[in-house]
Amino acid sequence: MTQTPVTDSAVNPQVAAAPVAVDVPMMRLHVKILRFNPETDKKAHWVTYDMEAQPGDRMVDVLNEIKWYKETGLAFRRSCQHGICGSDAMLINGRNRLACKTLVRDVAKDGGTVTVEPIRGLKVEKDLLVDMEPFFDAYRAIMPYFIHPTPFPAKEQYQSEANAEKMAHSSNCILCACCTTSCPIFWVNGSYIGPAALVQAHRFIFDTRDEAKQQRLGVVNQNTGVWRCRTAYNCTEACPRGIPITQLIEEVKREVMFGQS
Ligand code: SF4
Ligand code: SF4
Ligand code: FES
């Protein structure tokens, strides 16, 4: 997190020069984390860490630095660190984001404070770690896999371009839970399966190769399903993949009303 090496070849690709170190001004940063240790704490409390970071560092880099050099007990999830696995969703400055897709310069000024909290609506196990089981229970409920009782034909089953287009958004979901844990309906009633599960349901409902559309429509039509959505758009704003979630939920609602056989 100190210097960014650049090479002459970055300026002129024909020159393969030795890396040149360039000083990038560091920012001072107060990182205020809502911490909770179930073995010692009765309730969560804020702890502030004074850090330095480059403006282009990601918040996951800052959290790694805290964990590696200041507070080894800090608990948070991350894996790919490139916006693919969906494991590092957290509230940064009060908004659901992936720490690995959040640049320091976008959430703090030099000398400023950035707050980090666990996502809401799921039980906190420790610090920024939440129990994801209820989220994945909802995911499992919509049967997120192909169901095809009739034997597959010998040749490949094609999807029309128009149909693939319909599923283009929903198949981009990385199951990060940013949407479900920003939904006010989910906060007050955890039995609502939530926007992420509905996005996943959408992905299979509109896939003409799948044969369980009616079963899935039955699941989302239950009182824990799609009708709980109040079209508040929090989920769409929170999605780090830019998925138009509320629109997809509306499409699922229409399919429940008019697509049931
Ligand atoms: S649009 Fe529906 S699912 Fe999304 S946040 Fe609002 S109520 Fe929740
Ligand atoms: S729809 Fe977006 S916010 Fe919701 S789980 Fe998928 S990627 Fe995350
Ligand atoms: S660590 Fe995988 S999405 Fe951020």
Image (cartoon, rainbow, N blue to C red):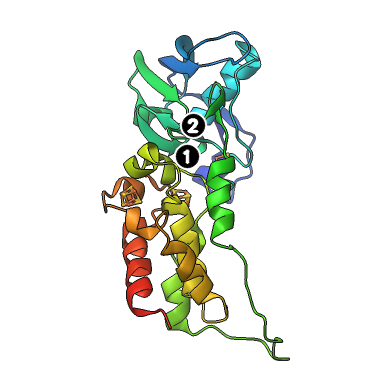
Residue matched to label 1: 101
**Cβ(mark 2) to ligand 3 < 8 Å?**
no
> Label 1: few (<14), some or many (≥20) within 10 Å?
some
- What residue type is disc 2 on? Arg
Front one among 169 and 13: 169
Residue 179 screen position, x and y as percent: 41, 46
Distance from mark 1 CB to nearest ligand 3 atom below 8 Å: yes
Q: Residue 115 placed where, x, y %?
A: 39, 21
Q: Residues within 10 Å of mark 2 (few under 14, many from 20)?
A: many
> For the residue labelled by badge 1, is the local secondary structure a helix, a strand or a loop?
helix
Q: Position of residue 83 (x, y in %)?
A: 53, 45
Location of the C terminus (image quadrant):
bottom left
Give the quadrant of residue 116.
Answer: top left
Instruction: Give residue 73's mark.
Output: none
In the rendered image, which residue does mark 2 sit on? Answer: 58
Q: Residue furthest bottom?
A: 154
Q: 61 or 151, which lies in front?
A: 151
Image position of 154 (left or right of 10): right
Taking the image as drawn, is residue 187 in sight? yes
Badge 2 element: loop
Query: Does the CB distance between marks 1 and 2 fall below 8 Å?
Result: yes
The structure residue drawn at horizontal position 39% and vertical position 43%, both measured from the top left corner, is 186
Q: Taking the image as drawn, is residue 244 in sight?
A: no
3 relative to 142, above or below: above
Q: Position of residue 1 (x, y in %)?
A: 55, 23
Is residue 171 depicted above or below 93 in this figure?
below
Sequence-first disc among 1 and 2:
2
How far apart are the two marked residues, 1 and 2, measured between alpha carbons?
7 Å
Closest to the observer, 19 or 46: 46
- At horizontal 63% and vertical 12% (from top left) the residue drawn is 39
Specify the quadrant of the image occupied by residue 8: top right
